[in-house]
């Protein structure tokens, strides 16, 4: 067995780029045991592979090289290492949970667009019936861009007269059991009441959506329409760069009775 290994041999053993080992040397994390004064060639003692293995292990667990060098590498014993691993496990689990939640939101947006886009007919106004739908309330436009829900879910916009406020539509594709369980909370996730809606589409920038909504109302004739319109952004700025191609479905509730009207006023 060799007593020392060259930097190339260490590189091959760990499948590491030589530049990585040079960097470890430069920051004092893994300094070769010998360095030829003439040609600068580095030699590592065989037992240094255990230190490098520990470095790679801790780095793989998510610790920065700075943390490994400053704290963890030279202070390992059974008790401290177990405590270290428990803490890191909690951090990793939290990160994994956040990533899974983000992926669920991405999948919802994909499914929502794929479901809605084939039904788009810009010229058509029709009556549709919907079950209860839930959303996460965001508020006015001044709050919109600082809220992660806006970025990760389809946007629903409630227009009342000249005011508007935003929510994140919790599109349920039937597969997200966690979402279904969470949406039971009516305070956190208000309901858009079930019922019939006069529906049409707006294509283009959002500032012109009032004109489309007025045309859709006019097409409703004698229908008793609520004073609110509920707009679902199907194609938005996150999937299309040209605002002329944005597509929004405008849904105006058809009022059944005064109790229903009061429900809609509460949105």
Image (cartoon, helix red, strand yellow):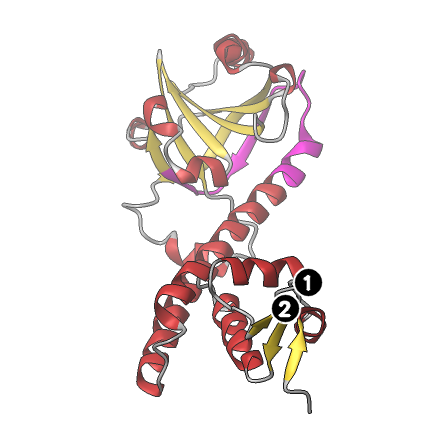
**Of the pair 218 and 34, the residue shown nearer to us:** 34
Q: Which residue is mark 2?
A: 36
Q: Which residues are magenta?
A: 113-136
**Of the pair 48 and 61, the residue shown nearer to us:** 48
In the image, 41: left or right of 52?
A: right
Mark 2 to mark 1 CA distance (whole Å): 6 Å
Can residue 221 be seen in the rendering of this structure?
A: no
**Of the pair 208 and 70, the residue shown nearer to us:** 70
Kindly identify the residue that appears in the image at 64 percent across and 81 percent down: 4
Residue 141 appears at what percent x and percent y? 36, 22
Q: Residues within 10 Å of mark 2 (few under 14, many from 20)?
A: few
Can residue 27 be seen in the rendering of this structure?
A: yes
Q: Which residue is mark 1?
A: 39
Q: Which mark is residue 173?
A: none
Residue 139 appears at what percent x and percent y? 32, 29
Q: Residues within 10 Å of mark 1 (few under 14, many from 20)?
A: few
In the image, 129: left or right of 183?
A: right
Q: Secondary structure at mark 2?
A: loop
Residue 73 appears at what percent x and percent y? 41, 73
Q: Secondary structure at mark 1?
A: loop
Q: Tell me the quarter of the picture where residue 36 sits.
A: bottom right
Above or below, 49 against 214 in this view is below
Pick the quarter of the image with the C terminus. Answer: top left
Residue 151 appears at what percent x and percent y? 48, 36
**Of the pair 203 and 98, the residue shown nearer to us:** 98
């Amino acid at each position: 067995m060799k007593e020392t290994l060259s930097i190339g041999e260490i590189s091959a053993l760990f499948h590491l780029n030589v530049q990585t080992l040079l960097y470890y040397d430069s920051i004092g994390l893994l300094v070769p045991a010998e360095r030829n004064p003439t040609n600068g060639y580095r030699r590592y003692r065989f037992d240094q592979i255990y230190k490098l293995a520990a470095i790679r292990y801790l780095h793989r667990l998510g610790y920065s090289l700075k943390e490994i060098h400053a704290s963890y590498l030279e202070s390992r014993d059974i008790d401290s290492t177990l405590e270290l691993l428990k803490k890191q496990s909690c951090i990793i689990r939290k990160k994994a949970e956040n990533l899974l939640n983000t992926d669920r939101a991405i999948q919802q947006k994909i499914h929502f667009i794929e479901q809605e886009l084939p039904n788009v007919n810009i010229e058509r106004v029709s009556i549709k019936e919907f079950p209860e739908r839930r959303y996460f309330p965001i508020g006015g436009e001044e709050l919109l861009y600082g809220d992660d829900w806006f970025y990760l879910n389809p946007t629903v916009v409630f227009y009342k007269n000249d005011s508007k406020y935003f929510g994140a539509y919790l599109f349920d594709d039937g597969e997200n059991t966690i979402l279904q369980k969470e949406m039971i909370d009516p305070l956190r996730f208000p309901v858009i009441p079930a019922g019939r809606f006069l529906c049409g589409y707006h294509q283009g920038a959002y500032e012109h959506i009032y004109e489309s909504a007025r045309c859709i109302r006019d097409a409703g004739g004698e229908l008793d329409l609520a004073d609110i319109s509920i707009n679902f952004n199907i194609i938005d700025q996150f999937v299309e760069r040209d605002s002329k191609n944005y597509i929004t479905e405008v849904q105006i509730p058809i009022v059944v009775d005064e109790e229903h009207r009061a429900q809609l006023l509460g949105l």
